[in-house]
Amino acid sequence: MIIISKKENIIFTQIKSLSLEYEEGIPESILKMELELYKQDLDDILEELTKKNLINYTNNKIKISTEANNEITIEEGIDADYENELNLNEKNSLKIIKSLVKDDKTISRYLLEGNLLYGELKLSNFIMYHVLLSLKNNNLIKMIKKNNGYYYQLLI
């Protein structure tokens, strides 16, 4: 039995449906256009599906592997591992947040944004705000206002 996340299932289902049209392999650009995903998000999920031997991903072509006929289970609910739903930048940012938060699970907005921009990850402004928005949407962090400014609170 192979366990995959919801996002992986969406992409895997799309790959199965497109594989009938593209017998030599589905071009990555076609899949990206069909799913309307960022390239990095798609690459991360394709890498995970390759690790689970569900697809073969070489030369920007995607094919269903023979392992794809095994029983597949989809993670669901609150108990599902949230990290499977995050891309690499989001996972790395979450690790940084966990290392920086205080006992009350808060971190100053400016301290966090500064660490993401100029620290180990060196994210651009656009990617940093995309990562923070994604973490908020996944209910992993939220912005709160205290007397002395804005803070992010870690919710996990």
Image (cartoon, rainbow, N blue to C red):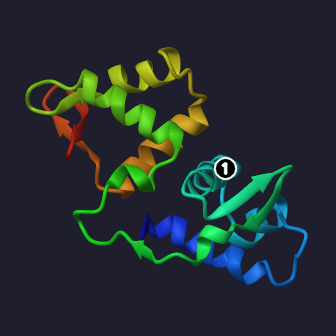
**Which residue lies at the image location 61% right of the left edge and 64% below the top edge?**
54
Q: Residue furthest top?
A: 119
- Viewer-nearest residue: 150 or 18: 18
Where residue 16 sits, quadrant-wise, is: bottom right
Residue 109 seen in the figure: no
Q: Residue at x 56, y 20 (%)?
A: 122
Position of residue 66 relative to residue 104, above or below, is: below
- Left or right: residue 154 versus residue 38 is left
Tell me how many marks there are: 1
Q: Nearer the viewer, residue 146 or 34?
A: 34
**Quarter placement of the N terminus:** bottom left
Residue 18 lies left or right of residue 47; in this view the side is: right
- Between 116 and 148, which is closer to the camera in this rendering? 116
Asked where in the image residue 53 lies, by quadrant, the reply is: bottom right
Q: Residue furthest left?
A: 103
Dot 1 lies on which element?
A: helix
Vertical comparison of 68 with 49: above or below? below
Percent of width and height locating residue 38: 67, 53
Say what amino acid the circle numbered 1 marks.
Asp
**Residue occupying the point 61% across, 29% down:** 124
Q: Residues within 10 Å of mark 1 (few under 14, many from 20)?
A: some
Position of 84 relative to 127 (above/below): below
Residue 108 percent location from the top left of the image: 26, 25
Residue 87 can be seen, yes or no? yes
Q: At x 35% / y 69%, what residue is drawn?
A: 75
Q: Position of residue 12 (x, y in %)?
A: 61, 71
Where is residue 134? Give x, y as percent.
Answer: 44, 51
Q: In this rendering, would 139 be left or right of 88?
A: left
Decide: is 110 above or below 59: above
Q: Quadrant of residue 81?
A: bottom left
Q: Which residue is under mark 1? A: 43
